[in-house]
Image (cartoon, helix red, strand yellow):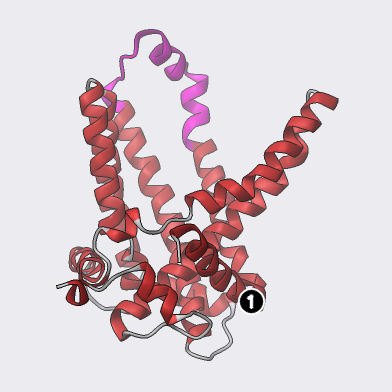
C-alpha cells in the first residue's frame, strides 16, 4: 500500500469520527476565531505605528518587536493548545466508548491550564528563537532554522495527548512525546506519512472556484473563503483525532475503535521489528 493511499485511508478513518461527532469541528473553529482576534489586537497597533512599513524599507527590527512577537506567540499558542487539548479529550472519550460533549472536552482542557500555559511559553520561546535565526541569518541560517523547525515539530508531534492524558510536567511530557515517536515510528512520521498532499488535493476545488469567481468579479474570490475556513477546521480536527489515535497505538499497541491496525502497522514500522 503506497503512502498516499494509506494517508487517505487514515484520514478517512479520522473523518469518520467527526461524522459521528460533528461538534468536534467547533474546537478548531473557536480556536481560529480566537487567534484571529488575538492577531488583530497585537498587530493592528503595529500597523498603525508604521512598524511593518519601516521593516519593509530597512529590514531592521527593533528588539522590542521580538518581545511583542513573543507575547503574541504565547497568547496564540495558549489558545490553540487549549482547544487542541479539548478536542483530544473528546476523541479519547469517543475511543473509550463514551459520548463526548463540548463541556467535557473544555473541562478536561481547563484542568490542564497550568501545563498548557507552561507549554505555550516553551513553544513560544522556541518559535521566537527560530524566527530570529531565520530573520538575521543568510540563506544557510534559514535552512538551519527550517531543519530545526522540522525536528521540533517531530519531537512535539504527540505533545497534546501526552499533556492531556498523563501527569508529567511540561519538559517530561516533551521527552515522553519524543520517546513515543522514536519507539514506534522514528523518522518515518515525516517521510512516510503526512496530511499535506491530501490537504492540497482537497484545496484544488476551492482554488478553481476562486479563479472562476475572480474572473467574474474582482471580489468574487471572497466566495471561497468559507470553503477554506471549513476545510482548515475539518483538517485540523482530523489531525487532532489522528494524534490521539497514534498516542493510543503507541501506548497500548492496538489501534483505537474505528481505525485499522494494519494501516498503523504498515505506515509506522516499529523499530524493534526492524532490528
The correct choice, above or below, for 201 with respect to 44 in the image is: below
Quarter of the rendering containing residue 165: bottom left
Residue 58 is inside the magenta segment: yes
Quarter of the image that includes the N terminus? bottom left
The residue to which callout 1 is attached is 21
Label 1's element?
A: loop
Task: For residue 217, say whether it is visible.
Answer: no
Query: Residue 180: x percent and y percent?
Result: 24, 71
* Residue at 52% over, 80% down: 104
Residue furthest to the top in view is 57
Residue 108 is inside the magenta segment: no
Circle 1 residues within 10 Å: few <14, some 14–19, many ≥20:
some
Query: Residue 158: x percent and y percent?
Result: 33, 66
Which is nearer the eye, 145 or 127? Answer: 145
Residue furthest to the bottom in view is 97
Quarter of the rendering containing residue 184: bottom left
Which is nearer the eye, 138 or 123? Answer: 138
Query: Residue 176: x percent and y percent?
Result: 21, 70
Magenta range is 42-64
Query: Residue 175: x percent and y percent?
Result: 18, 65
Task: For residue 134, say whether it is visible.
Answer: yes
* Residue at 66% over, 71% down: 22
The correct choice, above or below, for 77 with respect to 92 in the image is: above
Quarter of the image that includes the C terminus? bottom left
* Residue at 31% over, 84% down: 253
Amino acid at each position: 500500500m503506497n503512502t498516499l493511499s494509506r494517508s487517505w485511508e487514515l484520514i478517512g478513518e479520522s473523518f469518520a469520527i467527526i461524522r459521528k461527532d460533528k461538534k468536534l469541528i467547533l474546537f478548531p473553529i473557536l480556536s481560529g476565531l480566537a487567534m484571529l482576534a488575538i492577531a488583530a489586537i497585537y498587530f493592528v497597533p503595529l500597523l498603525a505605528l508604521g512598524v511593518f512599513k519601516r521593516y519593509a524599507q530597512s529590514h531592521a527590527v527593533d528588539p522590542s518587536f521580538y518581545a511583542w512577537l513573543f507575547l503574541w506567540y504565547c497568547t496564540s499558542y495558549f489558545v490553540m493548545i487549549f482547544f487542541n487539548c479539548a478536542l483530544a479529550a473528546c476523541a479519547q472519550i469517543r475511543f473509550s466508548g463514551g459520548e463526548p460533549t463540548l463541556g467535557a472536552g473544555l473541562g478536561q482542557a481547563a484542568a490542564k491550564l497550568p501545563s498548557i500555559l507552561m507549554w505555550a511559553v516553551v513553544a513560544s520561546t522556541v518559535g521566537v528563537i527560530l524566527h530570529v535565526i531565520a530573520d538575521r541569518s543568510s540563506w544557510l541560517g534559514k535552512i538551519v532554522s527550517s531543519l530545526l523547525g522540522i525536528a521540533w515539530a517531530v519531537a512535539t508531534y504527540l505533545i497534546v495527548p501526552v499533556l492531556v492524558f498523563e501527569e508529567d510536567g511540561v519538559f517530561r511530557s516533551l521527552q515522553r512525546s519524543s520517546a513515543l515517536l522514536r519507539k514506534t515510528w522514528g523518522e518515518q512520521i515525516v517521510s512516510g506519512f503526512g496530511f499535506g498532499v491530501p490537504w492540497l488535493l482537497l484545496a484544488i476545488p476551492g482554488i478553481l472556484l476562486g479563479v472562476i469567481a475572480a474572473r467574474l468579479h474582482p471580489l468574487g474570490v471572497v466566495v471561497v473563503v468559507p470553503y477554506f475556513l471549513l476545510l482548515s477546521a475539518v483538517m485540523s480536527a482530523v489531525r487532532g483525532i489522528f494524534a490521539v489515535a497514534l498516542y493510543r497505538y503507541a501506548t497500548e499497541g492496538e489501534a483505537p475503535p474505528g481505525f485499522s491496525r494494519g494501516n498503523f502497522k504498515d505506515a509506522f514500522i516499529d523499530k524493534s521489528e526492524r532490528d
